[in-house]
Amino acid sequence: MARKLLVITNNPRVQDKFAAISQHQSESYEQVLHQVRNRVHAGAKVLTHPLAGSVKPGESPYRSVCIDDQEGVLDMRSLEVIESAIDRFNTLISCSRQRIYDKKTLEDFQLIDYQLLKSGLDAIDPALTRDQHID
């Protein structure tokens, strides 16, 4: 069965650069994680780690996750990954203060999230990013 890739993101740069790949837009980092979990419960598999990179939840407001959005049997590994990510998010958010970033810093965080997703997509299939002429 062919993969049915879906990127769940709250990052405007990802929404723009990966417009040719199916996306679901979210309002927040936390919402991205919960939407991934909901899809996993319906049978999707997590393809890029929800906590990829060294930027912790609470530091960056952006997150993008690629899943194989097939319906079917619950993938326990994907469920463990997303539940662990949500637990880590909740722990780090409860310990951090609300951050307010200027436009340049937000653009930097968008770029970091974009590069992490691009790297993950390259690992899945280099043609996904090459064929899209994504820089």
Image (spheres, grey):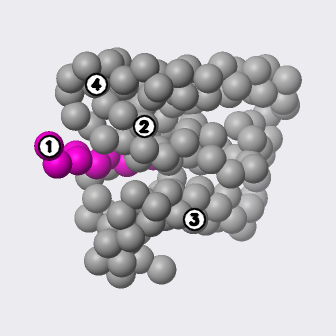
Q: Which amino acid does the dot numbered 2 rest on?
A: Val
Q: Name the side, left or right, on which 59 lies relative to 46.
A: right
Residue 43 numbered tag? 4
Q: What is the distance, in whole Å, between disc 2 and disc 3 at their CAs? A: 18 Å
Q: Which amino acid does the dot numbered 4 rest on?
A: Gly
Q: What is the distance, in whole Å, between disc 1 and disc 3 at their CAs? A: 28 Å
* Callout 1: SS: loop
Q: Earlier in the sequence, mark 2 or mark 1?
A: 1
* Callout 3: SS: helix
Decide: few, some or many residues near mark 4? Use Cα within 10 Å; few <14, some 14-19, many ≥20. Answer: many
Q: Nearer the viewer, residue 105 or 83?
A: 83
What are the residue bounds of the magenta stretch?
Answer: 1-10
Q: Earlier in the sequence, mark 1 or mark 3?
A: 1
Residue 46 numbered tag? 2
Q: Nearer the viewer, residue 3 or 54?
A: 3
Looking at the rendering, in which quadrant would you find the N terminus? top left
* Callout 2: SS: strand
Seen at 22% across and 46% down, the residue is 4
Residue bearing mark 1 = 1
Give yes or no for residue 7 being in the magenta stretch. Answer: yes
Labelled pair 4, 3 in contact (Cβ < 8 Å): no
Q: Which amino acid does the dot numbered 1 rest on?
A: Met
Mark closer to the observer (2, 3)? 2
Q: What is the distance, in whole Å, between disc 4 and disc 1 at their CAs? A: 14 Å
Residue bearing mark 3 = 115
Q: Is residue 10 visible?
A: no
Vertical comparison of 40 with 56: above or below: above
Seen at 20% across and 27% down, the residue is 71
- Of all residues, the one furthest to the left in this rendering is 1
